[in-house]
Image: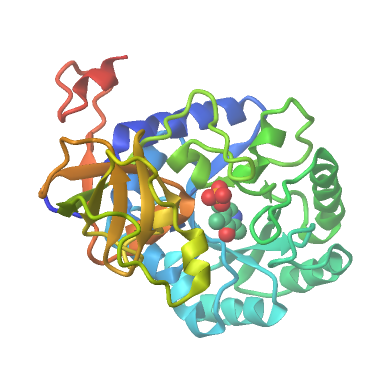
Amino acid sequence: MSCPRIDVDLHKIRQNTRSIVERLNVSGIHVTAVTKAVCGHPDIAKAMCDSGAAGLAESRLSNVKRLRQGGMTCPITLIRTPMLSQVDDIVQVCEASYNTEIKVIAALAAAALRHNKVHAIILMVEMGDLREGIMPQDLGEIAQQVVDMHGVALTGIGANFACLSGIAPTAEKMRELSVLANSIEQYSGPFLQTVSGGSSANLPWALGGYATGRINDLRLGEAILLGVDPVTGDKIGGMFGDAFTLVAEVIETDAKSVDAFVSYTDPTMAKTRLAPNNSATTRLLLAIGHQDTDAAGLSMPAGTTLIGATSDHSVIGTNDATLGVGSEMRFQMNYGALMRAMAAPDVQISLRNDRPAPNSRDVQGPFKHLALI
Ligand SMILES: *Cc1c(COP(=O)(O)O)cnc(C)c1O
């Protein structure tokens, strides 16, 4: 099989989705699955939708188009504030978008009228992350303006945490969002369909037994894909952390003395490099580099260290003597490494368990035994 590649186990994605959907549904929260880290890969999106996600969310129009071209017909919400230059396309492929700028909403409304549609608007409120969002005190007035426009419908509000600032949402913040939802309804009519509390960073709150109030939606990417809480990096119980595996090929193995010939032009480089201190360590060269992934975001197998990476190469120290030229090495990725690898033109995507067959003993693929657990 070609290298570098990402082996994607769709069975694990389905299980992760089902697991989190079931746990959140108990408290009246549905899951909008976020596909941006996998660049809107339609098969991965389908695995999420088949397993109980209520809809999809994307930050890029190009990824939304890929989802549609791949046959996804479920509701898709754009979670990055739309670019003015893209409004005509957005109203045609997205049912809804998150918005913070009245000028953009007016352009979406005009585009929706041109295309004979009504585009749903969810207003993003600033609650401490200091990335995108309307200040809470301005929300009422902007909501009123949206309600008065033809071509758009105000269907929800949402908040975002832990993206720029790394600050996780508190129960207090979630209560404030519920209060805002109630106050907005005097403008929006009887009911705001969506009150979206945030992302995977909200899971400790959502699963922590707090009152959920008006919050009825979370937008989840990392938790479903990698099974981890993005704020702490901790594994979420009952979720697979290895749905994605990056596979790279060894192109050189040698016994170069680690500190021979090294003269750093940039002194900071010397500090950031980890040199294996074991004389039994073999130094391997892999055909994968910064252009393919974030090498620092790869988890190294036991007995293996990352010595460094450049655009097209990674240098690994290992005490695994069985690895030779042509061998494959397998790595788990963090979110940054996954995101970059999924977007890299030279990284192939290889799908496992791409047909759900939970009731069949005849499950295809090399992981057939896992489907029967
Ligand atoms: C990326 C993103 C999400 C999903 O974040 P995860 O940490 O992957 O769950 C949710 N909302 C917005 C606005 C985002 O940009």
Classify residue 83 by image quadrant.
Answer: bottom right
Q: Residue at x 18, y 15 (%)?
A: 361
**One can see residue 143 in this view:** yes
Q: Residue at x 51, y 78 (%)?
A: 87
**Please, which colouring scheme is shown?**
rainbow
Horizontal arrangement in the rendering, residue 108 relative to residue 50 (left or right): right
Q: In the image shown, does 276 or 242 lie closer to the viewer?
A: 276
Location of residue 298 with respect to 103 vertically, above or below: above
Q: In the image shown, does 34 or 168 lie closer to the viewer?
A: 168
Horizontal arrangement in the rendering, residue 303 relative to residue 185 (left or right): left
Location of residue 27 with respect to 127 vertically, above or below: above
Question: Which x, y percent locates residue 130?
Answer: 75, 65
Location of residue 164 with respect to 11 vertically, above or below: below
Question: Which x, y percent locates residue 279?
Answer: 30, 41
Q: In the image shown, does 167 or 81 lie closer to the viewer?
A: 167
Query: Where ligand 1 lies, by image quadrant?
Result: bottom right
Q: In which quarter of the image is the C terminus?
A: top left
Horizontal arrangement in the rendering, residue 244 relative to residue 55 (left or right): left
Question: Which x, y percent locates residue 81?
Answer: 60, 70
Q: Which residue is drawn at 80% across and 49% down?
A: 177
Question: Which x, y percent locates residue 131?
Answer: 69, 66
Q: Residue at x 46, y 47 (%)?
A: 334
Location of residue 328 with respect to 79 vertically, above or below: above
**One can see residue 245 in this view:** no
